[in-house]
Amino acid sequence: MNKKIIIGLVLLLTIGGIGIAKYNSSTRNGAALGLTSNIKVGAALGLTGECANYGEGELKSAELAIAEANKNGGIAGRKLELITEDTQCSAKESVNAMRKLIDVDKVEAIVGLTWGDSFQAGFTINNAEKIVAVAPSSALEALVYNHASTEYVFSTWFSEKDEIQALQKKAGEMNIRKFVLFHDEDAFASMMASLWKTQASENGLTTVNEYKVPVGYDDYRTIILKMKADSPEGIVFFAQTQATRAKFMKEAKELGLNAQIFQSADIENESLLKNYAQAMEGIIYTFPEVTGDNSSFLERFKTYYGTDSVGASDANAYDATRVVISALTDHYQNSTSMKDAVAKTDIPGTAYKQIKFDDSHEVTGSNYIIKTVHDGKFVEMK
């Protein structure tokens, strides 16, 4: 054989061997294909409908976290790709969003659902497929209330047990102890009502009557007249949407219901206040105390988008996405299962000083402050 041909063959085999060695050295868990492809992360968020004032900010926060991770090299040299589906703030579309992200897009983890406590049917999909979902605005107590599985569901939202405790403690300090409980049949609202009743006796409060209505019900005048006959000192109202609660407060004032109204944290909505400022004046509500590096997040958010972060769960969504990124890093570096990687999360937070999950997959360390509406503004009570 020609000497030049022999040398050429040797060189080709040598180069090929080097290439194969490099290829094999970069292969992890036997996954030889797609090493240069993006790592797909799903986002099942409410971008239209009742929860869009949460979901829109959640998406921007998730995008920011992904962009920052990619700027820092991604994971094992691979870029992260965020694939978004709109849940349309409904149970049906939450299911469809999860189904598409898992079956069609083949995502490795999911940020969402928005308001997964109300639209928790979507979580049946990722649980069945064993794909981790980290929710930014879901009270997992609502899933427990409905005996639903949280095996592959985690949440960076604040503890509702702690929220009810803070609200009832304030009522006691104000010597308001005789309550009427009002709620719709939404899973979140029903869970909050259950927590209220469970913890009320421990805090020296009594519930003289309970009114329950279907989701979307807003013909309050008859119920308000019945409440006046109950002569409560306080009224606590939980419902799926803020707009229905604002309408209740408006009609309560019009009909002369003078009891102090207590609300949960999600009543803080600037557009709602713009339309119902007079009706909301004087309400008392809880609001999560942000203990993490929120100021830095707000600066980076504004730099990236040119607008301020205003969503109630923006910081939680940023944290939820960072949890997913941290877990994926552990998964690819150490072959840890995604569920175990998320469960052992221990990283600095934005909404929380440190992000850790308890055995129920809720983030630990919730604190609440008490706020009110004074002169048409949301302010902290002194």
Image (tube, rainbow, N blue to C red):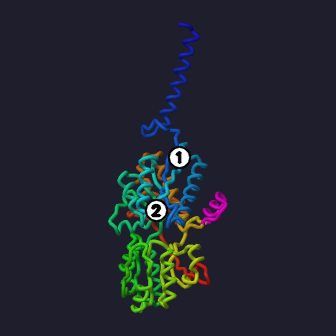
Q: Which residue is denoted by mark 2 in the rendering?
A: 356
Answer with mark 2 or mark 1, whichever residue precedes in sequence: 1
Q: Residue at x 64, y 65 (%)?
A: 308
| Residue 300, percent from left and from top | 63, 60
Q: Residues within 10 Å of mark 1 (few under 14, many from 20)?
A: many
| Image location of residue 10, percent across then percent down | 53, 17
Q: Main secondary structure of the magenta part?
A: helix
What's the magenta region?
A: 295-309
Mark 1 lies on residue: 75
For residue 63, which quarter of the picture?
A: bottom right
Tell me the residue at 45%/49% (across/down): 108
At 50% across and 61% down in the image, what residue appears?
Answer: 46
Given this view, does label 2 or label 1 mark the residue nearer the observer?
1
255, above or below 158, in the image? below
The answer to whether residue 188 shows anywhere in this view is: yes
Query: Residue lying farthest left?
Result: 147
Q: Position of residue 51 (x, y in %)?
A: 50, 66
Q: How many marks?
A: 2
- Would residue 353 be seen by someone viewing this image from the given angle? no
